[in-house]
Image (cartoon, rainbow, N blue to C red):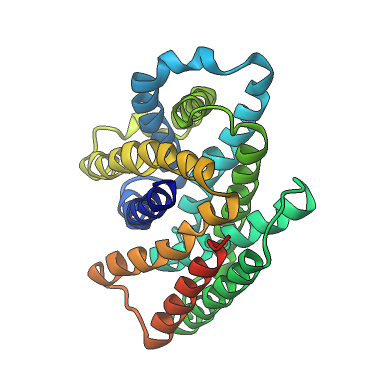
Amino acid sequence: MARQLKWILLAVLALIWGSSFILIKKGLVGLNPMQLGSLRIIFAALFLLLIGFRTLPNIPLHKWKFIALTALFGTFMPAYLFALAETNIESSITSILNSLTPLNALILGLLIFKLEYKRAQVLGVIIGFVGTAVLILNGAANHPSQNYFYAGFAILGAVCYGINVNLIKKYLSDLSPLSISTGNFLVMSVPAAIILYCSGFFSIIDRAPVQHSAYFILILGVVGTGVANLLFYRLIHLSSPVFATTVTYLIPIVAFFWGVLDGEFLTLVQCIGAVIILIGVYLSSKK
């Protein structure tokens, strides 16, 4: 049952997070990256505190430092980094760069967290990375006018995700997903509110484009961040950091679908890269 459940969670997360990049793109129409990232965190925090406030006493005092670290690397920094990236590169390309997460999780897990991995998992991540590289190079060739300096923000966000999954597996695997997520967003809510205030959001809140964009970020915050975090932490508990982060291999496929509907295009080479990525997902999940 657990084996089937982890695949179901993987598919649902791919659908949710694959849709997140187009929501960010729509949110940037009326918001700047700092406003978008802050609203995303605040909306998710309100949702999680509403349903999970009673679980906070379940977090031992000595584990709050790890709650703070996973909040920083798992959501806080990526919320701003991916928004910054999409100011200059397309949502579909950003989703591709997000696929570097499993490689980062593997490298960091081996070098820093001393976690064990099977050969098949290593091979799967390498194959997945090759598919990701095909997508990136072909995307760059077809979008020469885009500033790929901003791709660095997405890559850094993927590094943060790689750190986060290893922290959870090593230090927080005995806590429930709801406790971890609620604790994360309790820690993040205050700094996010301060950044939102300093960004000038409240001086433009009455503008129609700002309000329209905020609706997209409401969906992103509650579903794409709040609900998805609960599912993701549950997936880590059921499997491993490498398998959990292979969701990022599937995210570009969903993101490309939304991108095509929004005027972006998918080439034959990118389709081939997507198939290679799926092969990597299969191999990295083998025991």
Percent of width and height locating residue 273: 46, 79
- Horizontally, is 70 left or right of 275 in the view? right
Which residue occupies 56% across, 76% down?
133
Q: Measured along the vertical axis of the image, is residue 92 above or below residue 267?
A: above
**Quarter assignment of residue 42:** top left
Q: Nearer the viewer, residue 48 or 87?
A: 48
* Furthest residue in direction bottom, as rendered: 268
Residue 108 x, y percent position in the rendering: 72, 53
- Comparing 148 with 164, the one in front is 164
Query: In the image shown, does 2 or 165 lie closer to the viewer?
Result: 2
Snapshot quadrant of residue 202? top left
Would residue 272 be found to the left or right of residue 110 on screen? Answer: left
Q: Which residue is drawn at 53% across and 38% down?
A: 76
Vertical arrangement, residue 179 with respect to residue 141, above or below: above
Residue most extreme to the front: 1
Q: In which quarter of the image is the C terminus?
A: bottom right
Q: Which residue sits at x=58%, y=77%?
A: 130
* 88 or 41, nearer to the observer: 41
